[in-house]
Amino acid sequence: MQRAEIKKQIWKFVVVIVVIALICVVWLYKNKIEYEKEMEMSKQPISSFEPDEIAGYFPLDVTEPIDLEELKSFGIPIIIDFGADSCVPCKEMEPILETLNKEFAGKAIILFVDVWKYNNLVEGFPIEVIPTQILIDAEGNPYMPSENNSVQYLQYTYRDTGELAFTVHQGGITEEQLREALVEMGE
């Protein structure tokens, strides 16, 4: 009788192990497919994606250093807003940036850097006040506003070459003004 009971226990154990193994295989297979899809997407140029496929590709809030050269390589306009979540004009701009980030996914890169939380991310950018927006056209060059543009932009040049380094806007800016800039920048 004990022998039959031992065999029964062994079979139960084997069945449990087989079920667990099957669950693991299915889980690994599913994750492998998702990983391969993710890797395939990362190899394709961003212009080949549909906007809904890359809606989360550039999250609005930046928490890590910005690789400006990598962003320029996508060949789409870039707006980086440097502000803080507790600054009044910055708070007023928050819904505008969220809207533009979603609407222009795949057509422009819209980012926000909270300079009080991540002050190390300001390094290399000409930020004197908040909010400040850095604007870069689709060619990867500092934005050159048209003569008809009513917004006042500051342009910074490199001391040694005199070449234009950054085009910035200091202070709050309206959604319409940002849209106008995006069109002029090649959106």
Image (cartoon, helix red, strand yellow):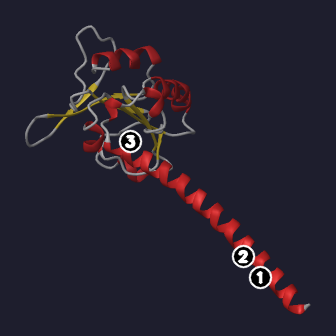
- Badge 2 amino acid: Val
Upstream in sequence: badge 1 or badge 3:
1
| Residue at screen point 43% across, 46% down | 38
Image coords of residue 36 (percent x, y): 43, 50
Q: Nearer the viewer, residue 101 or 8?
A: 8
| Residue at screen point 54% across, 36% down | 87
| Residue at screen point 49% across, 27% down | 102
Reply above or below: 96 against 66.
Answer: above
Q: What is the number of the mark on residue 149?
A: none
Dot 3 and dot 2 residues touching (CB under 8 Å)? no
Which of the 4 image quarters holds residue 85?
Answer: top right
Q: Nearer the viewer, residue 122 or 55?
A: 55
Reply above or below: 26 against 148.
Answer: below
* Dot in front, 1 or 3: 1
Element assignment for label 1: helix
Element assignment for label 2: helix
Q: What is the number of the mark on residue 14?
A: 2
Q: CA distance from mark 1 to mark 3?
A: 46 Å
